Image: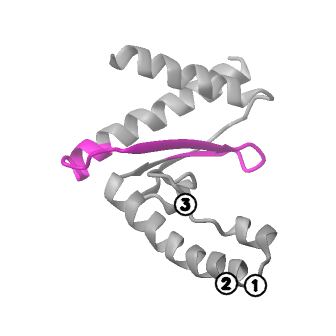
């Protein structure tokens, strides 16, 4: 079997386990954001799930801290530094480590193909197509 096929098979198995576990362990959890990541060098992938409530709560907490720095730098007239701390206008987290269920399911890979990101993109698109 080709490296890409092995990788996709392993990802499919991880997705199936994650869906089964989520339905069994957290049947009322509403998935707001899902993230699948692969660390090519470690040969590991994981899927993380987040809720809207968790995302909004963590974004607000981060914005509180950022707002203080933003206002401090504005008061000092340092617009360049202030811009770095401008509070976000977002309703989603982008770092899966901050998700409510970070690395909910993981898998170790036998091998990760050179263009693993294309295989992952195709796999996700296929799952989305089948779920609609």
- Residue found at x 57% / y 65%: 87
| Nearer the camera: disc 3 or disc 2 | 2
Query: Is the residue under label 2 in contact with that under label 1 (CB below 8 Å)?
Result: yes
| Nearer the camera: disc 1 or disc 3 | 1
Please indicate whether residue 119 sits to the left or right of residue 56 in the image. right
Can residue 100 be seen in the rendering of this structure? Answer: no
Q: Position of residue 71 (x, y in %)?
A: 62, 79
Furthest residue to the left? 28
- SS at mark 2 in the image: helix
Q: Give the answer, above or below, for where 20 lies relative to 98.
A: above
Chain-order first, disc 1 or disc 3 = 1
> Where residue 97 is drawn, which disc sits there?
3
Asked if residue 27 is among those painted magenta in the image, a careful observer would answer: yes
Q: Where is residue 25 in the image (x, y as percent from the top left)?
A: 24, 52
- Residue found at x 55% / y 60%: 97
> Where residue 4 is drawn, which disc sits there?
none
Q: Specify the color scheme.
A: one colour
Magenta stretch: give its range: 21-47
Q: Position of residue 96 (x, y in %)?
A: 54, 54
Q: Give the answer, above or below, for where 115 lies relative to 49.
A: above
- Residue found at x 72% / y 24%: 3
Chain-order first, disc 3 or disc 2 = 2
Q: Mark 1 points at which residue?
A: 76
């Amino acid at each position: 079997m080709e490296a890409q096929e092995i990788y996709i098979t392993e990802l499919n198995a991880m997705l199936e386990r994650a869906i089964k576990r989520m339905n069994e362990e957290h049947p009322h959890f509403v998935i707001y954001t899902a993230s699948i990541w692969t660390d090519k060098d470690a040969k590991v992938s994981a899927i993380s799930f987040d809720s809207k409530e968790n995302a909004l709560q963590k974004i607000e907490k981060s914005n509180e801290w950022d707002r203080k720095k933003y206002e401090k730098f504005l008061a000092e007239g340092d617009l360049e530094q202030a811009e770095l701390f401008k509070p976000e206008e977002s309703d989603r987290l982008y770092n899966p480590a901050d998700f409510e269920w970070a690395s909910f399911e993981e898998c170790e890979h036998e091998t990760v193909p050179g263009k693993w990101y294309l295989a992952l993109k195709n796999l996700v698109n296929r799952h989305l197509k089948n779920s609609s």
